Image: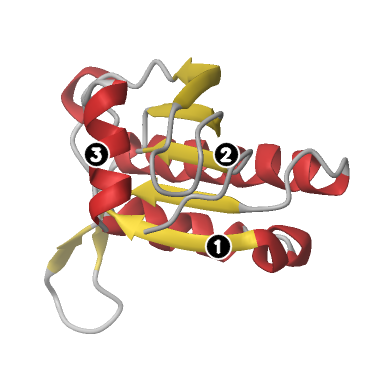
């Protein structure tokens, strides 16, 4: 993928977001970190306090278990929505002309739900991969290879 000079690149997952700016050229990106943020999102077992509730079935004599909430996933979805909101603010401030988003498929899907029309207009590409744990040099290589 060609990454134009001064493009804005967001590498995110449900817990971490990295904002980069390409200071290199389209063929050889040189990513500079502009901002990074990590969410405190403990595992679901550490968040929930009790087992799911039970309710009487409306028909028949049986009982039915309530669906158990996945608080960890709820927090990851909220974090993705927050990332989309930051992109909206920066797009409305004309902070970037070209945007590339890199995120795992589930996070990418959640981000898409919250994209503002200005963000969509500037979106140059998306990569469905989890690269938040990779060094910047490896992210640059993966962007160039896509």
The C terminus lies in quadrant: bottom left
* Residue labelled with disc 3: 141
State the residue at coordinates (68%, 60%).
122
Discs 1/3, front: 3
Q: Nearer the viewer, residue 24 or 123?
A: 24
Q: Secondary structure at mark 3?
A: helix
Relative to 33, residue 78 above or below: below
Number of other residues with Cα within 10 Å of mark 2, as a class: few under 14, some 14 to 19, many 20 or more: many
Q: Residue 5: x percent and y percent?
A: 59, 42
Q: Taking 83 as reference, is 93 left or right? A: right
The N terminus lies in quadrant: bottom left
* Residue labelled with disc 1: 124
State the residue at coordinates (88%, 40%).
93
Is disc 1 in contact with disc 3, using a CB cutoff of under 8 Å? Answer: no
Q: Residue 89: x percent and y percent?
A: 79, 40
Q: Residue 130: x percent and y percent?
A: 24, 42
* Residue labelled with disc 2: 83
Where residue 123 sits, quadrant-wise, is: bottom right
């Amino acid at each position: 993928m060609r990454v134009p000079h001064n493009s804005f690149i967001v590498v995110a997952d449900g817990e971490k977001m990295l904002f980069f700016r390409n200071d290199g050229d389209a063929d050889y990106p040189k990513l500079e970190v502009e901002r990074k943020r990590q969410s405190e999102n403990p595992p679901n077992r550490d968040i929930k306090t009790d087992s799911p509730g039970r309710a009487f079935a409306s028909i028949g004599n049986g009982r039915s278990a309530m669906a158990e909430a996945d608080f960890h996933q709820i927090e990851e979805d909220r974090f993705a929505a927050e990332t989309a909101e930051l992109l909206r603010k920066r797009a409305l401030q004309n902070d970037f002309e070209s945007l590339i988003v890199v995120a795992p498929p589930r996070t990418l899907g959640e981000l898409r739900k919250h994209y503002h029309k200005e963000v969509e207009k500037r979106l140059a590409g998306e990569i469905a991969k989890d690269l938040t744990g990779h060094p910047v040099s490896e992210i640059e290589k993966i962007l160039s290879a896509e």
